[in-house]
Image (cartoon, rainbow, N blue to C red):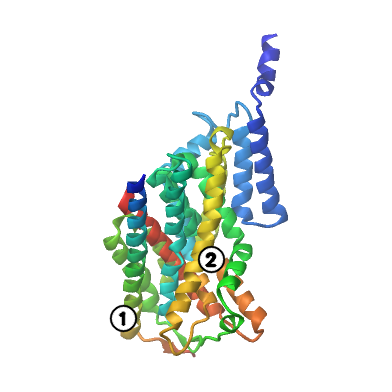
Amino acid sequence: MSQMIIEAFKLMGIGVGTVFLVLAIFYFLIIGLLKIFPAKGKE
Amino acid sequence: MESFLKLTQGFAEFHIGNLIMILIGGVLIWLAIKKEYEPMLLLPIGFGAILANIPLSSAVGDSGFLTVLYKAGISTELFPILIFIGVGAMIDFTPLIKQPVMIFFGAAAQFGIFAALLLAVLCNFIWPGIFTLKEAAAVGIIGAADGPTSIFVGNLFAQKYIGAITVAAYSYMSLVPIIQPPVIRALTTKKERMIRMEANYSSDLSKPVKILFPIVVTVIAGVVAPMSVALVGSLMFGNLIRECGVMERLSKSAQNELSSLVTLLLGITIGSTMGAGEFLNWNTALIFAIGILAFVFDTAGGVLFAKFVNLFLKKKVNPMVGAAGISAFPMSARVIQRMAQKEDPTNFVLMQAIGANVAGQIGSIIAGSILLALLA
């Protein structure tokens, strides 16, 4: 039982951390894409 | 006499559980028609539940058409994947790409998934053995606020609860306008809710960005969490069809015909899993209770993260936008805009809220995939 709770806490930590990490990568990906292909002014 | 017995067999097999489930099916249909709560899903689910609970129903069982659909579309995970193609074709990632910082709210608002998982595990203290870790993860995924992801994870980890998990996920998604506002109000001050944010309306994204975004996101997400390829890949494939500019007919088909048809089949098939034997128990009630808390934790996670970020920012973020980081798109963004305008009729945070909302779509898939990768 306590082992299961420890596992759940581990999952929570790794899960939340990885979601942030992956989305942080996407953040830098978007920044990079916008640098390479800058937005155009509206016509 | 034999003919009479055959004709009355249905009555003989009719139990109180069947009646209750038929009534529950009726309530779902009522909610869909009268209240317009996710009618495209709740109506087929409700009718599916009725079909499955008629004694000796030919719709279920080994050769029943609903069982055939279940084996073909749910067991194989095909229906959620196809729905994601349609969803991807419907989503415009422009608000997110224009304000990439919104992506972090899409991460913060997934907190509810893991908090609900923990809660489900803790239930074992009161009711020993009620949920295994995998089942707890399947219950937690209700917090993804995303039907297809819930079905995808639920089917792999807790097939016996798939009906309850799906109905809870879709019901609470439709109840976002009722669930989120009190949580947001409890965690923010009026002054915070009135914070204005600048939106970038002045420029158009270049086409290569819109085309490369779905491709690169798929590759990166796939490398980090290979289990996410099916979900992220189908979502981004749909989006690529939309953005490429040369497949307008297919894009429209994905948005309309494909989505409608699969949603219809998915709903009635999920409804057919709501047999009285599997559905009418305390576990179902507990799943619904934990599910609503998952939405509350999601909302709180997003709002509190925005407040935390504000400690370091000169230009403050309206913390309500954090709550739009859940995946219920576009309902959550609309709720946030409505709340912002209630405080200050000239305040527009819709663009930012939609950015966070589509980020939540990606975040929920990533969270679901991580659970699959860690537990499958």
**Residue B329: assigned label:** 2
Q: Residue at x 56, y 37 (%)?
A: B281
Q: Residues within 10 Å of mark 2 (few under 14, many from 20)?
A: many
Q: Chain of mark 1?
A: A
Picture coordinates of residue A3, whole percent (x, y): 32, 47
Q: Residue at x 59, y 45 (%)?
A: B45
Picture coordinates of residue B232, whole percent (x, y): 38, 60
Residue on which disc 1 sits = A32
Q: Secondary structure at mark 1?
A: helix
In this rendering, position of residue B329 left or right of residue B339: left
Picture coordinates of residue B291, whole percent (x, y): 53, 53
Q: Nearer the viewer, residue B225 or A39?
A: B225
Q: Chain of mark 2?
A: B
Q: Residue at x 68, y 33 (%)?
A: B19
Inter-mark Cα distance, 1 to 2: 26 Å
Disc 1 marks which amino acid? Gly
Q: Check if mark 1 and mark 2 are on a common chain.
A: no
- In the rendered image of this protein, does residue B230 appear above or below residue B302? above
